[in-house]
Image: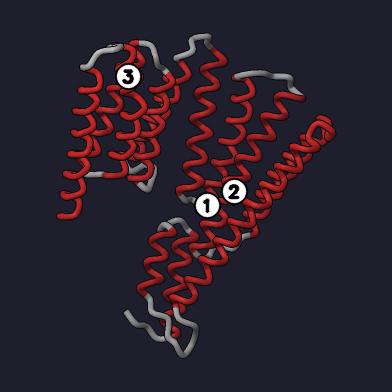
């Protein structure tokens, strides 16, 4: 599609507006911009503009990583000399700086949205670290109580940032913080070491249903993330017999559903779950028997067959 200069500008602004409002994803915005051909007489080629944006974005990520590594090395060398107040100030200041920096990043383009989402992800992690340190030093909490304070505070901040920037990165940050909070809260209320895993499993199952119904979008990534959470929660209940049954049922459910809906991403999550679950189950239930590796061989072959079937059906449709 080729547009005139004025048409291109209006269409580009409309796409950026949709992106800022959360009506489309950054990937969709990139594809739409790609379809709108920028006139050579009015502006540089679209490919050049996109390449420049990607270079700037990559440099920003690389610079941020280098800053974090340097800050970590400096903190490790002088951490104890800072004292309690100094440690809180360093971690809290870093979180606040990242939060402010993310707010200053322009979000009218796909690279800007991605950069802001990553910076706010780091800010949420920094806020969680600050709250954990505060609960340890000031409130004198320990163990799961620290997890409740840090996870709950990070989840609240992530929820606000997700409202401000409705993209998958902020949604995943909120979900992970909520999952951690649920597990830590149950661990605080009970001494049973398997129940926190059940809480994580339940959080993932609820999120999966919300994605399945379309309440939380985009559907495929939400389902894959939630399925991974259920598998993590099931693994946390091992090596009890009930936990192994739960883990096996979860793996089977994820794989079967992935084949039915022809979702390779969900199938990959199920395969990873099987890879982590089956060795534990086999060693516990069939120690030292030849039948165990044969079962694993059959299961692996079935997973490969399911992947090929899903890929072929997806290509045909």
Q: Where is residue 224 drawn, in percent x and y?
A: 35, 40
Residue drawn where x is 41% and y is 17% of the image:
237
Q: Is residue 54 above or below residue 90?
A: below
Q: Which mark lies nearer to you, 3 or 2? A: 3
Q: Where is residue 210 drawn, in percent x and y?
A: 36, 37
Display coloring: secondary structure
User: Between marks 3 and 2, how big is the CA–CA gap?
Assistant: 35 Å
Q: Which residue is mark 1?
A: 165
Q: Tell whether 113 sits left or right of 8.
A: right
Quarter residue 6 falls in: bottom left
Q: Foreground: 275 or 55? A: 275
- Quarter holding the N terminus? bottom left
Q: Secondary structure at mark 2?
A: helix
Q: Which mark lies nearer to you, 2 or 1? A: 2
Q: Which residue is mark 2?
A: 120
User: Between marks 3 and 1, how big is the CA–CA gap?
Assistant: 36 Å
User: Between marks 2 and 1, how big is the CA–CA gap?
Assistant: 10 Å
Quarter residue 280 falls in: top left
Q: Is residue 255 above or below residue 247?
A: below
Quarter residue 152 falls in: top right
Q: Secondary structure at mark 1?
A: loop
Dot 2 or dot 1: first in sequence order is 2
Q: Secondary structure at mark 3?
A: helix
Residue drawn where x is 65% and y is 52% of the image:
66
Q: Which mark is residue 246?
A: 3
Mark 2: few, some, or many residues within 10 Å (few <14, many ≥20)?
Answer: many
Q: Which mark is residue 137?
A: none
């Amino acid at each position: 599609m080729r547009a005139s200069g004025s048409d291109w500008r209006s269409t580009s602004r409309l796409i950026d507006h949709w992106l800022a409002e959360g009506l489309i994803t950054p990937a969709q915005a990139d594809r739409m911009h790609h379809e709108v051909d920028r006139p050579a007489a009015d502006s540089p080629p679209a490919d050049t503009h996109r390449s420049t944006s990607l270079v700037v974005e990559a440099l920003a990520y690389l610079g941020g990583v280098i800053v974090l590594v340097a800050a970590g090395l400096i903190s490790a060398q002088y951490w104890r000399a800072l004292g309690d107040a100094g440690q809180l100030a360093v971690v809290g200041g870093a979180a606040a700086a990242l939060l402010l920096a993310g707010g200053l990043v322009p979000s009218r383009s796909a690279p800007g949205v991605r950069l802001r989402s990553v910076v706010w992800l780091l800010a949420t992690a920094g806020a969680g670290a600050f709250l954990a340190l505060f609960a340890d030093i000031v409130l004198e909490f320990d163990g799961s109580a620290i997890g409740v304070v840090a996870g709950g505070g990070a989840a609240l901040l992530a929820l606000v940032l997700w409202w401000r920037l409705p993209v998958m990165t902020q949604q995943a940050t909120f979900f992970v913080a909520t999952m951690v909070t649920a597990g830590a809260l149950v661990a605080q209320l009970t001494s049973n070491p398997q129940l926190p895993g059940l809480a994580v499993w339940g959080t993932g199952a609820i999120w999966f249903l919300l994605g399945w119904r379309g309440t939380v979008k985009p559907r495929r990534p939400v389902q894959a993330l939630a399925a991974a959470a259920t598998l993590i929660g099931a693994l946390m209940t091992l090596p009890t017999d009930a936990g192994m049954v739960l883990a096996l049922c979860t793996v089977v459910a994820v794989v079967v559903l992935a084949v039915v809906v022809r979702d390779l991403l969900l199938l990959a999550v199920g395969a990873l779950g099987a890879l982590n679950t089956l060795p534990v189950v086999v060693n516990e239930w069939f120690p030292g028997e030849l039948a165990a590796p044969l079962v694993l061989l059959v299961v692996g072959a079935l997973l490969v067959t399911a992947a090929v079937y899903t890929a072929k059906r997806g290509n045909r449709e």
